[in-house]
Amino acid sequence: MKEPDPIHKSISELKSKAREFREKSTEFQGLEREFTFIQDELLKKYERSSPHRKQPADLGDIREAILREFLSSTGYLPLKYGVSKSSVRIVTQTGHPSNQIDIAIYDSLNSPMLLSYSSLSFLAIESVYGVIQVKSRLSSRDDINEGLNNIASFKKLEGSDNRFGILFAYDCSLKWTTLAETVKDFMCKNTSSVWTNFIVVLNQGLILPCEEGTLPYGVRNHCFRNSDLRGISKPDVIGIPDTSNTLLKFYLYLIDLLKSCTVEELDLYQYVRLPFTTGEKAYCFTYGEIEEIGQCHEHGTYLRKISNETINKIIDICSSSEPTDMLHLFEAAFGSNNLSSPDGDQSDQVYLYNPDKLRLVDILTLPNSIGLQCYSLLIDRKICIIPKYYSFRDKLISECPKCNYPATLYFET
């Protein structure tokens, strides 16, 4: 732990003397005094859990438990704000998950956990106000970037626009300037939507984002809200040294962020069966397991998969095609070749993957097969029809991983 500079040490001593005098006249002096005691207690608990007494994994659990207990057991957070009892992953309706996060604050009154183990839980993005990544000590740039990237993995999720992320550490063995430079470098390389709202080093102070060349003063002028971060064009950071009130500032900023966040009503039906993910895209087979699972005569069942490159290719080609419906495709494949746009409900519309503009009878039928020979995929809320002709020929949808490719089933006669 670093010794405070003389000025801030003097301020801390004056505050301590003032508290002693005030104690003689009133029992409750305000949050400042109470949080000074709590901060001292948290740091003592942290010191007692030092690495030479515990294994690194145990230390990680303890450091999270110390902060989690403060947030959930002291009564300082209103009951509607639940604190996760374990590490969490936050997931979206598209199936995209965050990295593993140490603490999530969520709507405990209206939103259940999607899945809960003793050491890991899953929460829907709609339920989560924000997350806190906990580090015992920031001892390298990698430590800092790991925490910032974990928070970014949450803030880049679809639906996280007004959510917050905080990096919390008990100690930092780096120079304060190194910590500030590392955070600033991360901000310069990433969009403001994934920035950490602020960084806490409990025994040293806070780091907050700000506009380069400005020095905001006062709690209400510090840039830590998402609306503030979006307004920063030239990112910089400002440090607030500890004067025995870092925990209080953390708490006040946290409450401010919670008040500015809104969570949505959770529709559990959207989480009954999540899509597959590939990169930033998500897809699902419209007919579920019937299309997801393939059967190889030699190797048994397997799961069909689609690469990110292929998904983007399918999106590009299908987006340029005219919408139709399955009835029109069936009639065109087995009767007329008229692929006109239907007049029915748009929810029935489908988009055909046909980059070579081939006759539908040639791409939607296979020898010795009955009915339309295609896969139906839901991508970006559009149903895309992929003829097996193209899938086999261009290897769009992976088949049996132990075979060269079942295209031979069709192209070899």
Image (cartoon, helix red, strand yellow):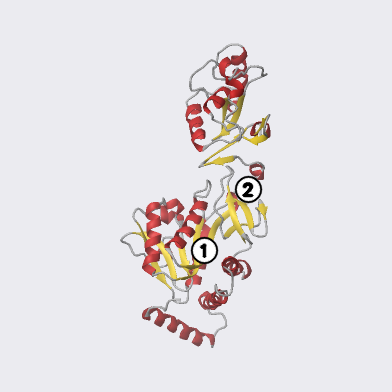
Q: Amino acid at mark 1?
A: Leu
- Judging depth in this view, the residue of 127 and 116 nearest the camera is 116
Measuring from the top left, give residue 159's x and y in whole percent. Answer: 53, 47
Characterize the local packing of mark 2: few (<14), some (14-19) or many (20 or more) Cα atoms within 10 angstroms. some
Residue 17 shows in the view: yes
Question: Is the C-beta separation of discs 2 and 1 under 8 Å?
Answer: no
Measuring from the top left, give residue 231's x and y in whole percent. Answer: 38, 53
Residue 183: name its quadrant.
bottom left
Q: Which mark is residue 151?
A: none
Kind of element beneath mark 2: loop
Residue 173: name its quadrant.
bottom left
What whole-number distance in Å separates the C-alpha atoms at marks 2 and 1?
23 Å
Kind of element beneath mark 1: helix
In this view, which residue lies farthest toward the top? Answer: 336
Q: Is residue 220 left or right of residue 64?
A: left
Q: Relative to 125, is 284 above or below? A: above
N-term mark: 2 or 1: 1
Measuring from the top left, give residue 363's x and y in whole percent. Answer: 56, 19
Q: Amino acid at mark 2?
A: Leu
Circle 1 residue:
254
Residue 112 shows in the view: no
Measuring from the top left, give residue 153's x and y in whole percent. Answer: 51, 52
Circle 2 residue:
266
- Residue visible at 47% across and 26% down in the picture: 320
- Residue visible at 48% across and 20% down in the picture: 356
